[in-house]
Amino acid sequence: QVQLVESGGGLVQAGGSLRLSCAASGSMFSINNMGWYRRAPGKQRELVAVISRGGSTNYADSVKGRFTISRDNAKNTVYLQMNSLKPEDTAVYYCNADDSGSYYWGQGTQVTVSS
């Protein structure tokens, strides 16, 4: 079992920045990819960014150049640095861990961007 706890969400004005953190605990030895997803009001959950254990990254087109995902394997923590935030980035952000096809989710953290 893996437990994920997100932090760092909040209210920010358009153009501002936030940094999300996701602390993982439990059986981490088989976790490869970790990532961030988000669900905006009235929309389906979507991938924001994902990072492999080796550091390879992939981003949604809507956040490329503005968001950066990083990972500290020693601390079992993944981060999402969000810059140049837009109102359309408003959503609940969820941390995800891929355990060889079994997926774990955090409880989510709210990010609200005001115009």
Image (spheres, helix red, strand yellow):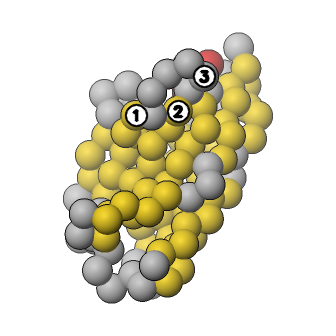
For residue 55, side relative to residue 25 (left or right): left
Q: Indicate the amino acid at tag 3.
A: Pro
For residue 32, side relative to residue 20 (left or right): left
Spatial CA distance of label 2 from label 1 is 6 Å
Q: Nearer the viewer, residue 50 or 31?
A: 31
Q: Earlier in the sequence, mark 2 or mark 1?
A: 2
Residue 87, horizontal then vertical, whole percent:
62, 19
For residue 56, side relative to residue 12 (left or right): left
Q: Indicate the amino acid at tag 1.
A: Glu
Q: Residues within 10 Å of mark 3 (few under 14, many from 20)?
A: few
Examine the image and state in which quarter residue 32 appears.
Answer: bottom left
Spatial CA distance of label 2 from label 3 is 7 Å
For residue 6, side relative to residue 77 (left or right): right
Residue at the spot x=54%, y=72% of the render?
3
The extreme top residue here reads 115
Q: Is residue 23 above or below residue 48?
A: below
Residue 113, horizontal then vertical, whole percent:
68, 26
Label ID, residue 46: 1
Q: Give the structural element (helix, strand or loop) at label 1.
A: strand
Do callouts 2 and 1 mark residues in contact (Cβ within 8 Å)?
A: yes
Do callouts 2 and 3 mark residues in contact (Cβ within 8 Å)?
A: no
Quarter of the figure that contains the N terminus: bottom left
Q: Give the structural element (helix, strand or loop) at label 3.
A: loop
- Which residue bears the numbered disc 3? 41
Q: Nearer the viewer, residue 42 or 32?
A: 42
Q: Is residue 77 above or below residue 6?
A: below
Q: Earlier in the sequence, mark 1 or mark 3?
A: 3
Spatial CA distance of label 1 from label 3 is 12 Å
Label ID, residue 39: 2
